[in-house]
Amino acid sequence: MLIEEFFGAKYKVAVMMALAKSHYIGLPVTPRSISRIYRVNLSFVYRFFRLLEDSKMILRVGKGYVMSDKGSELVNMIIDMIPRSGDDKIDFLKRSLPDTMYYIFTPMFQRWFGFRKTLIVIDKRLRGKINIRCDLCVTVYTTLRGRKYRFDWDNYVSKADPEQGYADLISYDESWEEYIPDILLNYDLMDLDEIIERSSAEGRRRIATALTYYKTLVGNKIPTKLFVPRMVDKKYIRNLTVMIPYLLDNRIIEARNI
Amino acid sequence: MRKKSDDEKSFLTEFKKEIMRIVPDIKILEKEAERISDNIQVLSDDERQTLIQSLERVYYIIFILKELTEFFKEKISFGGGSILNYLFISSKDEAPRFTYDLDANWNLNVSNKRELLEEIVVFNAALSERYKVRLPVDERRYLDLYQAEYDIEKDYFPDILSLRMPVLMRWSGLEFYRYVRSVANINMSFNLIRRLRKIFEEVLKIRDAKIDYIRFEISFKKDMPYKSYEIQLPFEFGREKINITVIEYQMASKIIEKLGKDYGDKIDLAAHDIIKTILDLRYLRYCDLNEVARYIDVLSEKYNVKKGEIMKNIVRNIRYVEKYLDEYMKKQYYILIRRKYSSREIISIVKSMLKTLGLFS
């Protein structure tokens, strides 16, 4: 990547991109969040921040930093160097939002046959400051505290871990049941307890109901830390019934009148 | 901050408390064995042990019956061998035959199993509020027992939903660690197995507790008359109002659908079923025979069979199984009946009742 060659080290790219992208938003970035999301060495990041501060490229604001007038001259150049993906909505995120302040997720397994929606979770402090237009997106403004996401250096975009992504989709998308086969048919590839724990209160009830339904349907073979039957919410069961064709073989459904 | 070992310890204490609450005490099984066998001392040691072991399974059948009744109330009714033998026959100074599943009927209209499964999910949620039997399988995960599940292996009929419930047993089923390996593909650590064995030994008096399925079925699309019977349940489960298919209807149905059926050259395959029917028909002695006769008429009309035909089939079927009855009676299901009656006596009782009903000459 040009940008990596230009700055010579990933931690420098991370710091410069974070500062450049937060410039137009007007929110400071912190070394700790950069280290966590870009997965770069924290002490290197601190050292680079000190260097930038000493050379008057950045200014300290509260616990974070913003570009100074001098540093802001570099903003457009840095943003232009960020590799494009060809997908307008993703490129918009890549150019406009600090990677520490959003993440995206697309369902990984697609055992269902609907449109593949993209989840975009954005720091609630950015509500009203940006405008994302996307028909096939689930856009959520919320706090990112404690959420599991990281910068994907292959695609230059912040992505949720699978458990976080599915937890959000189940929590925030009104068509949440569409993702249930993805989760249940791959329960051995993900941490179901983590999905539940990362979900909103409503999301927890949805996934717990789905899991209890699935255990009832195929036998109790999925060990969990949480006692999910206690979290069942009757009102969600009907949503799950329509998912049976994706969970069981059609011949069984027909022959046994399921 | 709590240590992991503290969490484990507290969980295992809770697990122990739960299994003490839900697994029948051996004394309860012995008491029931005494009650239904008149005098357990007349049984040989082997027979006594077999009886107590069989009763552990019966305990859970009654447990499920009670839970289903209390949860679904008017939506569900029960019938079949377990109800007849454990609730009716055994209450009349008669020896029950052992049967190990529970038959229920859904009293509301449903068109497919999907709708019924929704009800079972809610039932599971309710069960989870009352019992929390979670078998630890590794450092942080558990398999939940005492939850109903669809019995996909056994489910063949389009209008019968086959279900099962994994429960802790002393004598039948897979050892708990084998069960975990078999259903969840997890090899439990030796340390965990050792700690669980200690608990099982304290509570169940057996180190390698087993996990077995108790099977039950819910049929739908069946229109059977039922009424509420107030029954003193065995095993100190208390008194319960239970919707049960009218007992006279059950007798009539056994006569028309089993004993009076023409099995043709497949009679050898039906022999055991016929024998079970004959044993259950002992209860005719305690029924309102006018009602039984009325239901026989209703069912004959439903299946469009003539009385003469039924009589002919009854004679043929009884004659066929008579010669095998002694052999069948050696099975453990009939451990109590064979102590009370000879095969000849049973046949004679049933023939005499059928004669009264005008179905045997």
Image (tube, coloured by chain):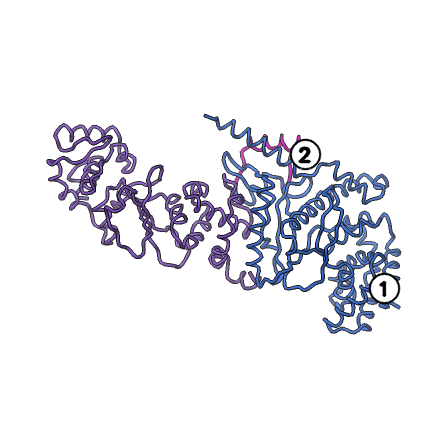
Chain colours: A purple, B blue
Q: Does residue B22 lie above or below B227 as drawn? A: above
Report the predominant secondary structure element of the magenta stretch: helix
- The label on residue B206 is 2
CA–CA distance in space, label 1 to label 2:
47 Å
Q: Provide residue B204's location: percent of width, then percent of height.
A: 68, 34
Quarter of the rendering occupied by the C terminus of chain B: bottom right
Q: Number of marks in the image?
A: 2
The amino acid at mark 1 is Leu
- The label on residue A247 is none
Q: Residues within 10 Å of mark 2 (few under 14, many from 20)?
A: some
- The residue marked by circle 1 belongs to what chain? B
| Identity of the residue drawn at 59% across and 34% down | B15
Circle 2 sits in a helix, a strand or a loop, which is it?
Answer: loop
- The residue marked by circle 2 belongs to what chain? B
Single out the mark in the foreground, 1 or 2. 1
| Identity of the residue drawn at 51% across and 47% down | A232
Q: Residues within 10 Å of mark 1 (few under 14, many from 20)?
A: some
Name the foreground residue: A61 vs B128: A61
| Identity of the residue drawn at 11% across and 36% down | A69
The answer to which of marks 1 and 2 sits earlier in the sequence is 2
Circle 1 sits in a helix, a strand or a loop, which is it?
Answer: helix
- Residue lying at the far front of the rendered structure: A128
The amino acid at mark 2 is Ile
- The label on residue B354 is 1
What range is drawn magenta here? B186-210
Name the foreground residue: B188 vs A246: A246
Quarter of the rendering occupied by the N terminus of chain B: top left
